[in-house]
Image (cartoon, grey):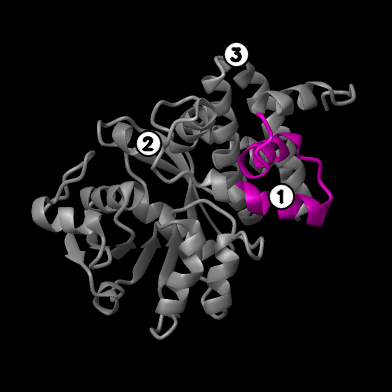
Amino acid sequence: MKVTVIGCGRWGSFIAWYLDKIHHQVTLYGRTTSERMKRFQETRKNDMLTLADSVLLETDLARAIESETIVISINSQALRDLMDQLKEYDLSQKYIVLCMKGIEIKTGERLTQIVREYLPDNPRVAVWLGPGHVQEFCNGISNCMVIDSEDEATKKKLVQEFSSDLIRFYYGTDLIGNEIGGATKNVIGIAAGMLDGLHMSSLKGALTSRGTREVARLIKAMGGNELSAYGLCHLGDYGATVFSEFSNNRKFGEMYVKGEPYEKLAEGYYTVKAIKKLEEKYQVEMPICNAVYDVLYQKVPIQDELKKLFARSLKKEF
């Protein structure tokens, strides 16, 4: 399969590395102004991997998208701008795979909804979600992930083409649940980092349990299967997000409560703003996500939010 990966950051470059490794013909696209792409052009390396000579590097978008499959791995809030750039090209017969997690703040839309606005007649739109870190994959540590799509043939094709002994893919069965679960796990990751920064890491067990419950409620309210919150897209990704030293979202939360800067992308920072709108729209109680929002955007002291969570009315666990 001929595949183009749009986005040469940590995850996009890994996807290019991985798909080349399992013998696909891969092009990695980055903007001419991208420092990451410039480094790849000069050394074919970043801090985590080296791209084989067989991976083509491209800075011309028109040439890059000549592949039959387009994998997109960029900041979720930039997806609409990218689709605006791509609308002049014919993508009607291409597989579009979103290997990114988030919800658009302005509209509250899932990422596949944005793509389908631009490609209403192309059913070949899919998501690639689940746990795993580039550092571990590149060291040969296997993991399980999920591919989901409203189109069964697309799902089957991509799972078969992308599976290997490094990544075991499962067929997703709930696009709404998988997208919402994948996005919100980054918010829980920030909350976990805040607990680490406060030296309250033992609370992460309760966070894991209760965080999954409130995300399940949102998924159900939006028309998805609440069990998806307990699958690979969300709970299955907690090991890589809530507990891992490599998690950008967890590290961002930790540095935030310590008052220290953190420059890497933490998608949960943007996602929680979108979740706030969805919570209000669907009338779902999400106290943990609310607490993260209030700390990040309302500048409420983290200790005040913890007190508020523990002062909530007593209730049954389920």
Q: Amino acid at mark 2?
A: His
Q: Is residue 251 above or below residue 82?
A: above
Residue 224 lies within the magenta run: no
Q: Earlier in the sequence, mark 2 or mark 3?
A: 2
Spatial CA distance of label 2 from label 1 is 28 Å
Q: Earlier in the sequence, mark 1 or mark 3?
A: 3
Identify residue for label 1: 276
Identify residue for label 3: 202
Secondary structure under tag 1 reads helix
Q: Main secondary structure of the magenta part?
A: helix
What residue is rendered at 21% in x and 68% in y? Answer: 58
Q: Amino acid at mark 1?
A: Lys
Q: Are marks 1 and 3 in contact (CB under 8 Å)?
A: no
Identify residue for label 2: 133
Q: Is residue 10 left or right of residue 306?
A: left
Residue 173 visible in the current orientation = no
Q: Which residues are magenta?
A: 272-301
Along the viewing direction, whichever of 252 and 6 lies nearer the viewer: 252
Q: Earlier in the sequence, mark 2 or mark 1?
A: 2
Quarter of the image with the C terminus is: top right
Q: Is residue 306 left or right of residue 81?
A: right
Residue 286 lies within the magenta run: yes
Res 63 → quadrant: bottom left
Spatial CA distance of label 2 from label 3 is 23 Å
Q: Amino acid at mark 3?
A: Ser
What residue is rendered at 49% in x and 37% in y? Answer: 249
Q: Is residue 246 left or right of residue 193?
A: left
What residue is rendered at 22% in x and 39% in y? Answer: 47
